Amino acid sequence: MLDTARMLYQGRSSAAQPNFNPNFVYLKAGIEGRTIYMVLGYLDQRPEGTVEVWYSGGGEVIRLLNGRLVGTTGLTTDWRAVRIANWPSWPVAESNTGNTSVQRYTRERDVMPGYKFGINDDIVRIAVPTPSDTAISGVEASSLQWYEERATSRPASAALPTARFGISRKSGTPVVVYSEQCISNNLCMSFERWPLPPPAAGTSASAGT
């Protein structure tokens, strides 16, 4: 899959769009000041859900579970392993941003470099109004339902900025179309499904054949 990702770029700069192959699914990512297009390599079936494994032409690997970051390879900071407890699914109906109810879960992550293992995050998720300062470009931000996830970390020095997610329900199932997530205080990323798949209830993502 890494060789396939490299071939799709054919020597283009990381900011240039590759020659999109309709047999593949793409992710537009903003990583360390670069805009790159990643290819869905495969789906990793785990007890907690299906993990999407994305590859860039430069060798970066991103792992997403229901839109949330659960692992990276090839970045200046990497999450080598992530363990989740009481992970809430995305709501199937639009949330009222005036509702004071929140959802909580816990995450444990192993971070490199520095052998920082077992960092604990207590995470609170809330619905928020449509933001005006995102990098989303493939769809109107107002067409999505937005959530923020705020974490209290142990140790406190490992605390992360607030994560943000834009959810679409056009397919009949909540799908994270866009997100902003950080794996350290100085490494934040954005991810956007690109191009957006047509609405098709019951259709799962795949890398194609």
Image: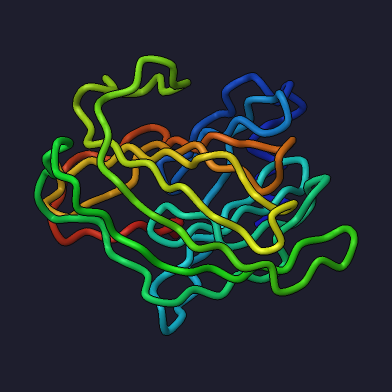
- Residue 10 image-quadrant placement: top right
State the residue at coordinates (66%, 48%): 183
State the residue at coordinates (39%, 55%): 124
State the residue at coordinates (77%, 48%): 59
Residue 148 horizontal/vertical position (percent): 38, 41
- Residue 130 image-quadrant placement: top left
Residue 40 horizontal/vertical position (percent): 52, 53
Residue 156 horizontal/vertical position (percent): 69, 55
The residue nearer to you, when weighing 85 against 62, is 85
Q: How many numbered callouts? A: 0
Residue farthest to the right, as pictured = 114
The residue nearer to you, when weighing 75 against 96, is 96
Position of 81 with respect to 165 (left or right) is right
Which quadrant would the C terminus be assigned to in this image? bottom left
State the residue at coordinates (65%, 57%): 1
156 in relation to 11, above or below:
below
Residue 110 horizontal/vertical position (percent): 72, 68
58 in relation to 124, above or below:
above
- Residue 199 image-quadrant placement: top left
